[in-house]
Amino acid sequence: MPTFPDIIIYAIPFFIVAMLLELSLTLKEGLKAVKGYETKDALASIAMGLGNVFLGYFSKALVFLCFFLVYDNFRVFTIPVAWWSFILIFFADDFSYYWFHRISHECRLFWASHVVHHSSQHYNLSTALRQTWSGGFYSFVFWLWLPLLGFHPGMIVFQMSVSLLYQFWIHTETIDKMPKWFEAVMNTPSHHRVHHGSNPLYLDRNHAGILIIWDKLFGTFQPELKNEKVVYGLVKNINTYNPVKIAFIEWLHLFKDAFFGRKTLKDRWLYLMKPPGWKHDGSGQISDDLRKEWLKKK
C-alpha cells in the first residue's frame, strides 16, 4: 500500500508564519480597520481549525474505510500510482470539489456543516482555518466515484489535502489581483472574496477549489467588481465567537425546521434538501430570490 504524508499537519508552521506576515503587512499599510484581524474572531477561527484537525483523525478513518470498500470490491479499473495518474486525479478531485462546494450552498443538509466556513465577518488567512467539525463525516460522498474508477484511496485523500492547502492563501485582502492569465484559470483571492460575500450579487458564486474553470463552465462565475465592495459573512450573521455554537448552531436550526412543528412529511424532507432560506409556507428567500430582488432595484 502506498503511503502519503499528511501535508496539512506539516503545513501548520507555514500557516502561522503566513498569518503573522499578513498581519504585519496590514498594520504597516495602515489597513487594520479594513483588512486587519479582530482578535476574538481570529481566535474562534483558529479554534475551529484545531477542532477540525482533531476530529479529522476520526473522519479520515471513516473516509478511508469507505474508499477502500469501494476500491477493493467495486473498482472498474486499477489506476497505478504514477506521474500521469496524479495529473488525472488533480482534475478529477477539483471537479469533485466544485460539485461538493456548490451543493453545500444549494442543499441545507450540506450547508449545515459548510456554513461554519462562511460565519466570519472578516476575511484574512485565519478565516481559512475556520473549518467544519461535522462535514468530514459525510461530504466525502462526492469523491466516491474516484475509488470506483480505480484511484487508490491514499492518492485521493492526498490530493484532497493538496486542494485544501492551496485554498489557504486565497483567503486574504492583501493581494488584489493576480496576472490576467492566472485569474482566467486559477482560483484567486479576488475570486474567493466574491465567494465569501453576503452581497446578493455574490451569493453562491465561485465555488472553485483550485481551478476557476468549473464555475465558468457551469455558470456560477462572478468577477469581483470595484463598485460592489464585498460584505463578508452570512445573510443573517450568527454573531458568536463560541466555537461550539459556530460548529453546531445551523444543525440546531435545521433540526428545528425539519422535525418540529406541524408540517407534512414532504416538507420535512425538503427542509433537508432545499437551499438555505427555503420555507415551506413560502415566506423564505433563497439566494436566487435575493439576487433577483437586488437586480430589480439596480
Image (cartoon, grey):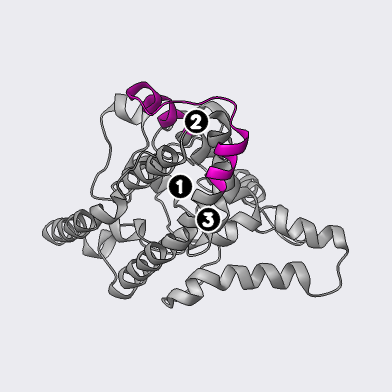
Residue 144 highlighted magenta (yes or no): no
Q: How many marks?
A: 3
Callout 1: helix, strand or loop?
A: helix
Q: Which mark is residue 195?
A: 1
Q: Quadrant of residue 282?
A: bottom right
Q: Is residue 220 visible?
A: no
User: Which label's residue is closer to the chain start, 2 or 3?
Assistant: 3
Callout 3: helix, strand or loop?
A: helix
Residue behind mark 3: 62
Alpha-carbon distance for marks 3 and 1? 29 Å
**Foreground label between 2 and 1:** 2
User: Which label's residue is closer to the chain start, 3 or 1?
Assistant: 3
Q: Residues within 10 Å of mark 3 (few under 14, many from 20)?
A: some
What amino acid does circle 2 point to?
Answer: Trp
What amino acid does circle 1 point to?
Answer: His
Magenta segment's dominant SS is helix
Q: Residues within 10 Å of mark 1 (few under 14, many from 20)?
A: many
**Foreground label between 2 and 3:** 3
Alpha-carbon distance for marks 2 and 1? 14 Å
Q: Is residue 265 visible?
A: yes
Residue 79 highlighted magenta (yes or no): yes
Q: Which mark is residue 214?
A: 2
Magenta range is 66-92
- Of residues 149 and 131, the one nearer the viewer is 149
